Image (cartoon, helix red, strand yellow):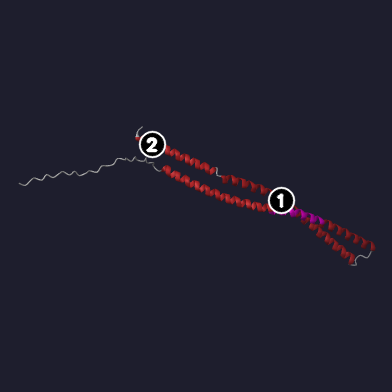
Amino acid sequence: MTIATSENLHVLLQVQEKDSQILAANHEIKELPERKEIEATQRKIEELDQVLKAKESEVHENNRTQKRLEDEVATVEERIENQKRKLYGGEVIAIKELQALEMDIESLKERQIVIEDQIIEVMELNEPIQSEIQNLTTQQEENKENEANLSEALQEAIKKIELRINQIKVEKETPYKRPTKRTNKRIRKPTLKTWPCRHSKIS
């Protein structure tokens, strides 16, 4: 295998390794635990929404019933006042008619008591439901706050992984340079060779 072929193979292996790292990072993004926690929280929110709507509908229906009964009480009270005016206004003087008015007033008062009792029953029905709605609303607010926190944590986690992916891509696109082998051979410095001087004898 030539040096060029060896280098090309090494570069290919490096690219494949970076691709594998990118795939693993993308899979990590899809499998982040915050995703499952968000999905579970969203299911809780949807379920509570349905329960809240049912409870609120029940309260609304009870309120309509209470309003209808209150209107009936107002009508009965008006009739009682009308009968009292006839009874004490001097328009009616016949004893039988006066007695009839008195009986009618008593009957209307009894009817008023019955309706007012029904109103109290409806109000008593609403009290625990409204308390439950309040508790469910508090739970819902906590769930939504938890969802927001999880979403923020998810975005932060994704951001960190994406930064890692971008870094891997940069490394992948950077041309690979095979490290050169360093030789341990020491370069011998040239040494100056000294030659002995021959001194001639002066005769």
Q: Quadrant of the N terminus?
A: top left
Q: Quadrant of residue 176?
A: top left
The residue carrying mark 1 is 55
- Left/right placement of residue 54 relative to residue 116 reads left
Residue nearest the viewer, comparing 83 with 131 = 131
Which amino acid, mark 2?
Asn
Q: Residues within 10 Å of mark 2 (few under 14, many from 20)?
A: few
> Residue at (42%, 37%) from the top-left corner?
13
Q: Which residues are magenta?
A: 117-134
The location of residue 33, given as percent across then percent down, is 57, 45
Q: CA distance from mark 2 to mark 1?
A: 70 Å
Q: Quadrant of residue 199?
A: top left
Position of residue 141 relative to residue 81, above or below, is above
Answer whether residue 119 is magenta in the image: yes
- Left/right placement of residue 202 relative to residue 28 reads left
- Left/right placement of residue 169 relative to residue 79 reads left
The location of residue 15, given as percent across then percent down, is 43, 39
Magenta stretch: helix, strand or loop mostly: helix
The residue carrying mark 2 is 8
Residue nearest the viewer, comparing 20 with 79 = 20
Answer whether residue 11 is magenta in the image: no
The location of residue 118, given as percent across then percent down, is 81, 55
- In the picture as drawn, the residue positioned furthest to the bottom comes out as 90
Q: Quadrant of residue 182?
A: top left
- Left/right placement of residue 177 relative to residue 74 reads left
> Residue at (87%, 64%) from the top-left corner?
84
Helix, strand or loop at disc 2?
helix
